[in-house]
Image: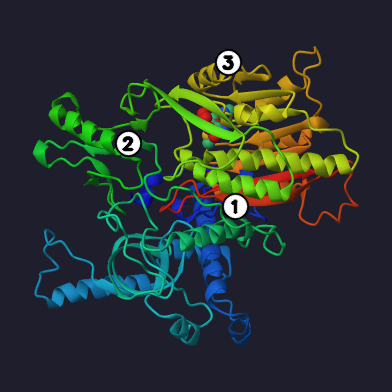
Amino acid sequence: MLAKDKKKVDPWGLPSALDPDIHLYYYPKDINVEKFSSFAEKKHQKTKLYDQIINLFFNSILDPDQMENMGDTKFLNFSDKTDQEKWCQNPPFTAVKNYIVSRETVSTNNQNLNDESTSVQPTTLMLHVHKVMNNGYGLATTENSEQLVNTLKAGDRVWFYVVPFTLKNEIVYAQVVENNWGYSVCDLKSVETKAENRIDAPCKYFGKCSGCQLQMITYKDQLEFKQKSVEFSFKHENSNFINSEIVVNEVIGSPKQFGYRTKLTPHFDLFKWMPREQTSIGFNYINRREVLDIEECIIGTPHVNSGLTETRKITKNNFDTFKRGATLLIRQTESLNETFVLKPKDMVTETVSTISTLNIDEQIYNKQMQLLDDLKSEKGFTGDLDTVSYKFQFQASSFFQNNNSVLPKLVHYVRYQIGLANKYRLENKFPEIKYLVDAYCGAGLFAIGCSSDFEKVVGIEISKESISNAKNNSLGIKNCEFYQGDASNIFEKVKQTDGSINFSPNQTAVIIDPPRKGSNPQFLNQLVEYAPAVIVYVACGVPAQARDINYLVRNGSVVLNPTETKNAENKPLYKISSIQPFDLFPQTFHVENVVTLIRIN
Ligand SMILES: C[S@@+](CC[C@H](N)C(=O)[O-])C[C@H]1O[C@@H](n2cnc3c(N)ncnc32)[C@H](O)[C@@H]1O
C-alpha cells in the first residue's frame, strides 16, 4: 500500500512520521504542539522528522572517529526554517538527477518523451543498503558508505531509497515506485550482492506479498532484529532515553514460527473492466494497492488455511453479490463443530492456559516459561506443570490476539512482573498489591488470566461486544468485574468511596494494552495521578508506546535513574523494571512489547 493511502492520525495531533511506516513517532522537544495546525507548520514538522531520520541513519553508518574528522560539517542539519521550507518545495538534486537519468535512458531507447501517451519507465537503480529500518524496509543510497563519507560536503543533501526485503550491506537493483520528501519508495528487482545471513524464503509469495517482511532471515535473526527495533523506538534521538542505560531484553520467541495466525483477512477488488475469473483474492502486493492472489498463507494455521480455500470458493461463486469488493474474515475456533468461521458475528472460542499458582522464584519462573513453550507447539505439552485453562469466547470481528501459541507465556510474564513488583514493594514497606485494573481489556485476556493472583479485578473496554464477551468469559470467576466505557473512566470507578469498588492505588496494579496508536496525554495524566503501585504497559505499537513512556519521563513521572529522586515534590515516581518484547508476529516486522513501571515512592 502506498504511504499516502495510509495516513495515520497521531493521537497527539501531530503528523506521526514522515512515512507512517518509518515508525518514528515522537514528541518534539522545542515545538509548541498547539501551533501545529497550519499546513506549512506540519510540513515543517515533517521535514524535521526527515532530518531526524537522516541523523539516525548517519549515526549508524559513521563511526565516531569519522564523525570527528568531518569537523563541523553539519550536512544533516537544516540551517533555518526558510531553508527547510524551500527544500520541501524543491526536492534535493539527487532525486531530480535520478529522475532525469531515468527519462534520458528511456529517451536513448528511441521513445518519444514528448508524447504524453508514452509511459516513462523508471530506470533500475543500483543501491547500497545501509540498514534495515523498523518497518523491515532497507534504507539505501546510490552511493556506498565510503563514497558518502568522502564526497559529502556541508549543505549537501542525500536522497534515500527505501527498499523492501533487503538486508544491511547488500547491493541491490531496485525501481522507484513513489517519491516523497527526502526519499523514494522502491520495488526490489534483484539482489546483486547478498548479505551473509540471507536465506531462501519458504513462502512462494514472499517478495511480492506485503504480509511478511522478514522471511529472508532465520528466526534467530528476526528476534535480534526485533530487539534492536524496540531499542531504536525508545532510543531515537529526540527521546530522553537516548543517553540512558535502559536494557531491552532478548525477544521471547513464538513456539510456532509458521502456521500460527488464527485470523486471516484476505480481500478483493471488483472492476467493471476486469473479467471475474481474473479477480484476485488475497493480500496487497508490496508497495501497491493491488491484490495478489493468495491460495495459501503459511503463517496461518492449517484451519484458517482450510477457511481460506473455502471462502475463496464461496466468494468466487458469488462475485455478483458484491459491488466493488470486500474484505473477508477467516478465524479459527475451537467450537465443537467447526474449526474456522467466516462471518463477523460468529462466535469464536479459544483456550489460553496459564500456571495455576504464581511463583516468583526466578528459576522456577524460567523453567515454567520453557515448559509453556510446549503448551501450544507441534509436539504438544508433556511437562509437569500445574496449569489452569481459560476459555475465551468472542465475536469473530472483535479483537483477540492472533497468535495463540505464545499467549500462555505472555500472560505468565505479566503475572510474574506484577509478582516481582509486589515483592519489591513489600521489601520497601509498601502494602501488598491486591487489586488489578485491566484497561483496554478486550474479551478479558489479562483480567481473567491474572485473576487468581488478586482479591479483585476490574476490566474496562470500549467495545460493547467485547465487554459482553468478557463478562461471559468470567462467569464462574467471582473476583472479576467488567465495564463498558472509555479507559479513562476507570479512574473514577476505582476511586469510588461507596464501597462498590475502592482500590487503594498503593495496592493496585494497572495493565494497559491500547490499540496500535497508543495512549494519549489525558489518559496518561490520569493514570499517574491515580498512582498505582505498578503499571504494565503492553503494546503492539512499540513506537507509540515508547512515545507515551517518554512523555511520562518528560513530565517527571518516570525516572530513568532511580537514585536521582531527590527533587521529587511528593509526586508519584516510577522506575522501569523491565522492557520485554514478545514475538507474536513471526516473519513480519511487528513485535509486541511489555514495559513494567514500578512505583518507587
Ligand atoms: C490491543 S487490544 C487489547 C485487548 C486485550 N488486552 C487482549 O489482549 O485481548 C485493545 C483494546 O482496546 C479497546 N479500546 C480502544 N480504545 C479504547 C478506549 N478508549 N477505552 C477502552 N478500550 C478501548 C479495543 O476495543 C481493543 O479491544
Q: Which residue is mark 3?
A: 475
Q: Nearer the viewer, mark 2 or mark 1?
A: 2
Residue 26, numbered label: 1
**Residue 62 at x, y percent in the picture:** 55, 79
**Residue 457 to residue 192: above or below:** above
Q: Earlier in the sequence, mark 2 or mark 1?
A: 1
Q: Quadrant of ligand 1?
A: top right
Mark 2 falls on what kind of element? helix
Any atom of ligand 1 within 8 Å of the CB at mark 3? no
Type of the residue with mark 1: Tyr
Which residue is disc 2 drawn over? Answer: 304
* Alpha-carbon span between mark 2 and mark 1: 37 Å
Q: Residue at x 22, y 38 (%)?
A: 269
Which image quarter: residue 571?
A: top right
Q: Amino acid at mark 3?
A: Leu
Which tag, 3 or 2, sits closer to the chain's start?
Answer: 2
Residue 123 place in picture, x, y as percent: 23, 71
